[in-house]
């Protein structure tokens, strides 16, 4: 009894760790997903054309893509706490410096190179958040719970992006970009305080059990193979990169599409982008729970690629066939952006859970970094490609290419697990009350 009581704080502490992971991702997501929602104000405030706008927005993604793998390797070596504290603190400092050095004034407007380099730096420093917080969550939760836990953590990305979409355009319009960068700096700094207070390594019993479970899942040798040499991990990472194209097309240029082509106002644009992020957040949590119960992460990922491809192909056809014949089309375009953007984001938690499970908990930082490298390399390339597509074929070409990349992810993602593994998952579910009672009696520390 005494042993069980002593383990109760450890059982409950995992939710604080998940909360820290959520807050860390949300605060940085408010930057890399929220700053693009100010695209109209960036364009006017910094005197940018569409090409320069795409370049500066892409710098955030390039910085994250360049730094993800080094941060992931460092996380596996140093641990989650050190890397997350270092990254959040440095990101907050960089954003605070931008409020002083990279804000347009009537007398002087920072040039494109200066703005691009500072956003690149923010991306490089903020890249620490993804792998370190994900590794912490994987270490504190067991298989059968990780899909939900990681999906909740990944929900922070659209949640932070939704917060940014609601707040940053208004801040840019009324307070200028000093207010935008200052608020983002405060968010990162406050999250660093939470991480300092609550983030720590799990108890030895829990860490040993989690690592052993991952090894059994993969039938790995006593020394796990590096994720960098694992074809299955690479396939998931590359599929993530391809399926991020439609999602990031919406995040980076959805506001420009609604403003320039749909003639939408600031309120409509902000509400639409917030709805995209809210829908994505809800879909991520539901999909994580559903795939935990059914053991079908790979099938779900592949289904999302097909549905996303269909939705964006339909958007391309509607834009090409109907255009802006009357004001009601603004509502249609906004609705399609919401549905397509939410679907294009729904699979994130499931895919990153699959990555970490394939690699094992001790190598999860590296594996998650590989997936995030693909995702944020796409964040760099997508806003660079969209202006070129606009010059060639206007908006139907943009959404058609987004649809094509969603379809490319289908053959790249690994095929679903074997029938034997699916049947094992079904037997685990059918155990019901007996299985839960057995876990409670034998391994209470994993609850």
Image (cartoon, grey):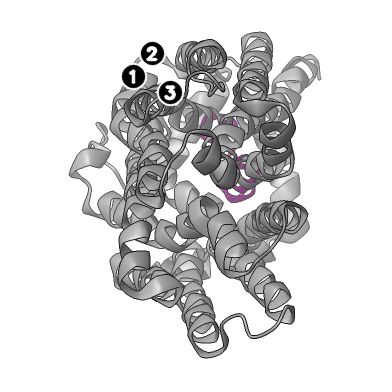
- Percent x, y for residue 120? 37, 28
Q: Is residue 75 above or below residue 227?
A: above
Residue in view at x 54 percent, y 11 percent: 100
Residue in view at x 45 percent, y 72 percent: 395
Please state if 302 lies on the left or on the right of 177 as rendered: left
Marks 1 & 2, CB-CB < 8 Å contact:
yes
Marks 3 & 2, CB-CB < 8 Å contact:
no
The numbered dot on residue 96 is none
Among numbered discs 1 and 3, the one appearing first in the sequence: 1
- Percent x, y for residue 411? 30, 72
Q: Is residue 114 magenta?
A: no
**Foreground residue among 165 and 351:** 165
Q: Is residue 147 magenta?
A: yes
The numbered dot on residue 110 is 3
Among numbered discs 3 and 2, the one appearing first in the sequence: 2
Please state if 2 lies on the left or on the right of 114 as rendered: right
How far, Cα to Cα, is label 1 from label 3?
34 Å
- Percent x, y for residue 89? 53, 11
Find disc 2 in the rendering and name its residue. 78
Q: Which residues are magenta?
A: 137-155
The numbered dot on residue 74 is 1
| Mark 1 crowd level (few <14, some 14–19, many ≥20, 10 Å Cα) | some
What is the chief secondary structure element of the magenta stretch? Answer: helix
The C terminus sits in image quarter: top right
Q: Is residue 164 above or below residue 402?
A: above
**Element type where label 3 sits in the image:** loop
Depth check, mark 3 against mark 2: the one in front is 3
How far, Cα to Cα, is label 1 from label 2?
6 Å
How far, Cα to Cα, is label 3 from label 2?
37 Å
**Element type where label 2 sits in the image:** helix
């Amino acid at each position: 009894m005494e042993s069980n009581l002593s383990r109760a704080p450890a059982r409950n502490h995992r939710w604080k760790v998940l909360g820290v992971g959520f807050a860390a991702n949300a605060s940085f997501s408010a930057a890399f997903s929220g700053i693009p929602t100010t695209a109209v104000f960036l364009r006017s405030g910094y005197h940018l054309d569409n090409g320069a706008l795409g370049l500066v927005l892409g710098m955030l993604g390039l910085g994250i893509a360049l730094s993800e793998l080094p941060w992931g390797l460092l996380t596996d070596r140093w641990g989650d706490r050190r890397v997350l504290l270092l990254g959040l603190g440095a990101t907050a400092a960089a954003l605070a410096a931008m409020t002083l050095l990279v804000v347009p004034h009537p007398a002087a407007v920072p040039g494109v190179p200066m703005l691009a380099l500072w956003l690149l730096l923010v991306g490089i420093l903020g890249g620490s958040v993804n792998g370190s917080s994900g590794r912490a969550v994987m270490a504190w939760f067991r298989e059968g719970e990780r899909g939900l836990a990681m999906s909740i953590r990944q929900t922070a990305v659209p949640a932070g992006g939704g917060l940014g979409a609601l707040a940053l355009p208004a801040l840019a319009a009324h307070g200028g970009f000093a207010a935008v960068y200052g608020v983002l700096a405060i968010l990162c700094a406050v999250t660093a305080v939470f991480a300092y207070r609550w983030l720590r390594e799990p108890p030895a019993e829990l860490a040993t059990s989690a690592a052993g479970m991952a090894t059994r899942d993969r039938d790995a040798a006593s020394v796990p193979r590096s994720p960098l040499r694992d074809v299955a991990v690479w396939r998931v990472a590359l599929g993530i990169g391809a399926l991020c194209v439609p999602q990031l097309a919406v995040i980076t240029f959805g506001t420009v599409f609604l403003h320039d082509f749909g003639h939408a106002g600031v309120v409509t644009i902000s509400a639409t982008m917030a709805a995209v992020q809210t829908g994505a957040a809800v879909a991520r949590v539901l999909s994580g729970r559903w795939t935990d119960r059914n053991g079908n992460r790979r099938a779900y990922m592949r289904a999302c690629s097909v549905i996303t491809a269909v939705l964006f192909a339909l958007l391309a056809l509607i834009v090409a066939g109907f255009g802006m014949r009357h004001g009601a089309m603004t509502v249609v375009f906004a609705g399609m952006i919401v549905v397509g953007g939410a679907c294009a984001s729904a699979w994130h938690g499931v895919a990153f859970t699959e990555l970490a499970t394939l690699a094992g908990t001790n190598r999860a930082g590296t594996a998650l970094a590989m997936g995030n490298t693909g995702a944020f390399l796409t964040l760099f390339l997508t806003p660079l490609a969209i202006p070129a597509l606009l010059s060639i074929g206007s908006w139907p070409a943009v959404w058609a290419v987004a649809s094509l990349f969603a379809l490319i992810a289908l053959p790249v993602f690994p095929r679903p697990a074997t029938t034997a593994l699916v049947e094992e998952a079904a037997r685990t579910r059918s155990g019901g009350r007996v299985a839960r009672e057995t876990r409670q009696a034998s391994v209470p520390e994993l609850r």
